[in-house]
């Protein structure tokens, strides 16, 4: 006999990943503004530029993931969870 399959748990990790990207986006924008990113790029000083460029690279990489990859990832995880939940509810489990 086949044991009834339990419904898939809610995709918390994917939703938390999206929320973490939102926080990184907001905090990163404020940090880079406080550090003077635009001013540092227009009139570079060696030490300041060495700090600003890696931070700006990480910030913009996280922003690209937030804007282009995370919405599909979160939406896909939620759709799979809903479909699996409906399928297990239809089987009476």
Image (cartoon, rainbow, N blue to C red):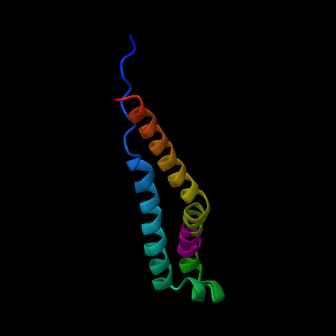
Establish if 68 lies above or below 1. below
Task: Residue 19 in the image: state x and y as whole percent.
Answer: 42, 62
Task: Residue 63 in the image: state x and y as whole percent.
Answer: 56, 67
Residue drawn 58% across and 60% down?
A: 65
Looking at the image, residue 16 sits to the left or right of residue 54; the answer is left
Residue that extends furthest to the top in the rendered view of this protein: 1
Establish if 88 lies above or below 39. above
Q: Which sits in the foreground, 1 or 59?
A: 1
Task: Residue 71 in the image: state x and y as whole percent.
Answer: 55, 59
* Magenta highlight on residue 90: no
Which of the 4 quarters of the picture holds residue 2? top left
Looking at the image, residue 56 sits to the left or right of residue 42; the answer is left
Q: Which sits in the foreground, 92 or 49?
A: 92
Secondary structure that dominates the magenta span? helix
Which of the 4 quarters of the picture holds residue 52? bottom right
Bounds of the magenta segment: 50-59
Q: Quadrant of the C terminus?
A: top left
Q: Quadrant of the N terminus?
A: top left
Residue drawn 46% across and 34% down?
A: 87
Residue drawn 54% across and 77% down?
A: 47
Residue that extends furthest to the right in the rendered view of this protein: 42
Establish if 24 lies above or below 40. above
Question: Looking at the image, how many numbered discs can be counted on the residues?
Answer: 0
Task: Residue 64 in the image: state x and y as whole percent.
Answer: 61, 64
């Amino acid at each position: 006999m086949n044991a009834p399959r339990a419904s898939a748990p809610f995709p918390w990790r994917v939703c938390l990943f999206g929320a973490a990207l939102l926080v990184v986006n907001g905090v990163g924008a404020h940090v880079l503004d406080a550090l003077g990113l635009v001013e540092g790029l227009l009139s570079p000083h060696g030490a300041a530029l060495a700090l600003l460029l890696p931070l700006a690279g990480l910030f913009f990489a996280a922003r690209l993931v937030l804007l282009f990859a995370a919405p599909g990832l979160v939406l896909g995880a939620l759709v799979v969870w809903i479909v699996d939940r409906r399928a297990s509810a239809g089987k009476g489990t």
